Each structure stands twice: as structure tokens, then as C-alpha cells.
Amino acid sequence: MSAKIVNQAVTIGRRQSLVGIVTQPAGYVPSGRPVCVILNSGIIHRVGHHRMYVALARMLAAAGSQVLRFDLSGIGDSENRLDGLSPLDAAIADIREAVDWLATSKSAQRIILIGLCSGADHALIYGSSDPRVAGLVLLDPSIPPTLQYYCRYFARHLRQPKSWGDMLIGRGRVWNWIRKFLGDRSEEVLESHRIKLGDPAVRAYLESAYRRTMNLGTQCQAVFTSGFPHQHNYRRQILDAFPSVPFEGQLRLDYFDGCDHVFTSEADRKRLFGVIMKWIQQPGFVETLPAATTGEAASAKDLQMQHASHGT
Amino acid sequence: MTPFFFGSSDRQLFGIYEAARCAPVKGAAVLCHPWGPEYIHAHRSLRQLSNMLAAAGFHTLRFDYFGTGDSAGDMTEARLAGWEADIRTAMSELLDITGARQVSLVGLRLGAALAATIAITAGAKVRSLVLWDPVLRGEEHVRELHLESPPGEKAIKPRPRAPEDGGGYDILGFPLTDQIESEMKALDLIALAPALPARSLIVASHPLPSHDGLRRVLDENKRDQAIEFIADHPPWIELPLGHPLSGAAPVKVLRRIVEWLA
């Protein structure tokens, strides 16, 4: 990477209790570009699994973007909140404080949120309520199962000798369902950390978040991996799960077959970074046209046509 | 808590300084982290240790070696000698910030082996040394790294790396290049044990075959130290989501370290 970048350690938020790193080009920072914010996935601190967010932030900065990686309260180096908010509400409040800080300290007018797993869910939920969020990069976000998901799931397991072995010794998802049906609650402790994505209330909540996001005109890049088979197992699952959400022209989809959930392989990370860099260079995000003009509307229209050609 | 960058412009290191939160100040401590995926999972426990030390009256500095965490550089450019130099830089930084004349070094796993090397050569600058589940034999450590795999998923085996990228293997997403692997394999803390500072604590929560060798050398050299074994979970190993100890810090070990240093 030849372009020079600088890193700045910051403490942000109302109590200055959120620790983050701003990475940006060393000299001229193009104005009008959205500032990228990379969110924690699970309890891994802001560098990300195998330091992938450091590499991504440096790559984005070398291409002219400002990037903030920060720890949500209670994660990494950030202190716990003192207001007793639930974990989800606390995460959303933290993101709002980070975005507000970027608006005042870095003159950010538009934001792109990037997140993996829980980070993707936080990005979606926050992004659906703040018009400053111009883009979302969602890596393995939560989506409900569909009929095709179950067909693929069982077809895959029927082909695996291990599944038959598990069946014979009373292990696996089917046996768990049978046990639960018969009143056994022993598996519930381990399962309790997983949100029941098939639950109608959860499905309606996510659908509403995606609909609001699309209505705000937010551009989305979603990447699904085959490494999260208990949640999704095909590229278009999100479209089938939310058939009434108007994704056309705003959602770009990629499916990484053979890739694990946290992009452990360097080759998968390179591919992922390539997808993100290409998406972020779209006309609506780079400063070739002045923001908030008819020109921007025109570039968004171009983008819709471009996405339509991708079949998303 | 103050996050900041320090060191030279071509080797910027990221650190977090925590000032002692009670008087009288009992000292200053630099924390040295383990390698690669082990650091990612142990980060939470090291932060907790730093917090507990600050509450007990220690100024602490946690930092990332070059090519790790938020520090500059790439892991493929890293060398163990460079990381030892980074620890010296961090010690100087903490002495400079606090006005202290001595620091204590606390190292976990590979960080303990690096800290021990520094403590032996730094003389009076190091007040005391804590070796937390130290890497005793580099060969053993490299073998362990090759066997580490995340829970609940298919085993992610080490993947060979291209020779033009430094060779070696990708271990859970981190490059263990031929160069750093050979440097790690050459580590032999047992051979250094007779020269450890008089005020050293060796605490282990994870039994290793090499512990017998260290005990023997400590006995032969009539050293006061012994390996204190504390049954607690190893924080550098990822536990499955939903496991009761997932994300938890090994409180018994942390308490012992703080109590001993104080």
C-alpha cells in the first residue's frame, strides 16, 4: 500500500468513554465522501478477527476515505455505560454518539456502517433510523429461514454420513426438536443466546428495519458466507425472507461459498476487501459530483441501473 | 484511560495508559500480550488485569507490538527482536509519563517469554516480573499454535503461505511466517530461568509438558520461585458462544497477579 495514511487514537461519546481509532489519508481528505464506521462483531475488540478491520481501514484510507473503528461500551477498551440500557439499546446509543462525534469533529455528513454478524445487525438497526447513514456493508447479517433454506439444509445433511451417525446416537437438530416437543428443556440454556430468527416478531422487526432502510435510500452491500449454515445457506435468501421489501437498485448481494463466518482465509479476506472497495467507489459515494444536488440523484439512478444488471 | 500512539514515526505503537486510581502509588507495570489469535481472545482479560492493577495503585501501560493490534505495520514484517525492542520503548514511555524509576513487566504466553528476556537484560529498571502461562519452549508453543482451532466449527487447519509472502502458515488467520516461526522455536525460557530476576512470579493455569523441565532447573539452581498452578480457564483460547465462561476473565489468576505485585 503506497498511499500514506495516519492513525489517531480517540475517546468519543458523551462520557468520552468509547475508544476508537480514526484512520485517514495523510494529506488531503476528499470532502463529501461518507465516513466509514466499522463496528465490533461479538465481543472481539475493534481490530476484528485476525486484525481484519485494521487492514480494511488502512485500505479504505489509502483510497481516500476516513474510517472510524471503535469499541462499543463494555467491549474492548470502552467502558460500560452507566444508564442501564439493554445491550441492543446500548449499542445503538453508542453508534449514535459515534456518528454525532463524526458530524461535529470530522464534519461528516454521510456515514457508511460496516459490520459482521452482530455488527451487521447493529448497523442495520441503527441505519434504519438515521438518514445520515448513506450505506451499509452487512456481513452475515441475521435473516430468517425460508422454505428453500430448509430444503437445502436437510438435503445437505442427508448427504453427510455424520448426520446419519448423529441421528443414530440421538444428536443433532432433529433430535433437539423432538426432545423439545416432548418437553425436554435441557438444550435451551445453550440455545438461549441465539435469537429465534424464525419467530414472527423477529421476522417482522427485521423486515421493518430493511424497509425503513430502503425507504431512506440507503445503499447496501450484503455478503453472506457458507460458514453460517444455521442461519443462511443461499445467496438470495434475504430476498425470499423479505419479499415485500423494495430492495431493487439498493442492495448488492454476494455469497462466499467455502468461506467461514469470520473470513479466516487470507484469500477470502482479499476477496471481501475487493467487494467492499468496488462497492464504495460507486458514483454516489465518491466526490465526482457535488452532494445534495440533482447530480447526486442522477448518479443514484445510474447505480440502480447498474445493480439491476447484477440481478439483485 | 488514555489511548495514544507512541514510538518513532516509522514504528508507531498503540498503547493504553491507565493511571493508578489510589494512593499511595505502588509502581508502574507494562503488560505484554501473546501472539496472534491468542491475543484477540486474551485482550479482554488483559484489559481487566490493567483495570485491577490501576485500582490497586499501579500505573499501567498495555500496548500492541509492531504489526499487531492497532500498531503500525503488518505481522509479516514482525520479528521477535523487534517486539523486544517495542517492550523497551513501552517501558521508557511509561517511565517518562509517570516519573517512576522502575517498571514491572507482566507477560502472557509469548509475551511472558519476551518480557523475561527483557527483564534479564534490563537490570534494575525492572522491579518485578510476572510470567503468566509463559511459553517455556518455543517448539512446544509452535506445536500448540498449529493445533489451535475455533470451537463449534469445522477444524480450521493451518494453511501454507506462499514463499513470496514469507512462507510458513496461516494460523487462524494470522501469518506465522517461516522467519517468525524459526525465531519462536529458538525460544528457551527454561535455559534462561537461572537468570530470572529475584522478584519473579510464575503462574500457570494450563499444564504443559515443559513445566517439569522448568521445575527441575529452578530446583537445581536453588531458586526461590516455583510454578504456582491456579486452576482457571485459559483466556487465550476461544470458547463457544453460549459457554458459561465465554468472554469471562480468569479472575483467580488476575487476583493472584495483582496481590503479588502489590
Image (tube, rainbow, N blue to C red):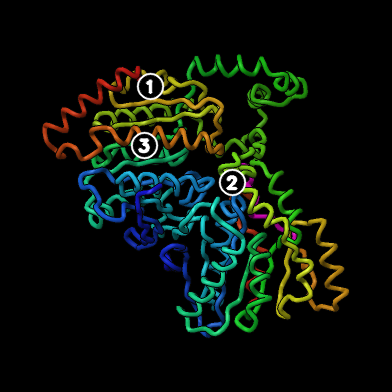
Residue holding disc 2: B166
Q: Residue at x 40, y 32 (%)?
A: A275
Identify the image quadrant of residue B85: bottom right
Identify the image quadrant of residue A183: top right
- The amino acid at mark 3 is Met
Q: Residue at x 45, y 21 (%)?
A: A235
Chain identifier of the residue bearing label 2 in the image = B
- The amino acid at mark 1 is Phe
Residue holding disc 3: A277
Is there any visible trace of residue B225 in the rendered image?
A: yes
Task: Answer yes or no: are tags 3 and 2 on the same subunit.
Answer: no
Distance (Cα) linking label 1 and label 3:
27 Å
Number of the front mark, 3 or 2: 2
Q: Which mark is residue A300?
A: none
Is there any visible trace of residue B242 in the rendered image?
A: no
Chain identifier of the residue bearing label 3 in the image = A
Closer-to-camera residue (B7/B234): B7
Residues rendered magenta in the picture: B231-244
> Is A170 inside the magenta-drawn segment?
no
Residue holding disc 1: A242
Secondary structure mostly seen in magenta is loop
> Where is residue A45 shown, x and y percent of the image?
49, 52
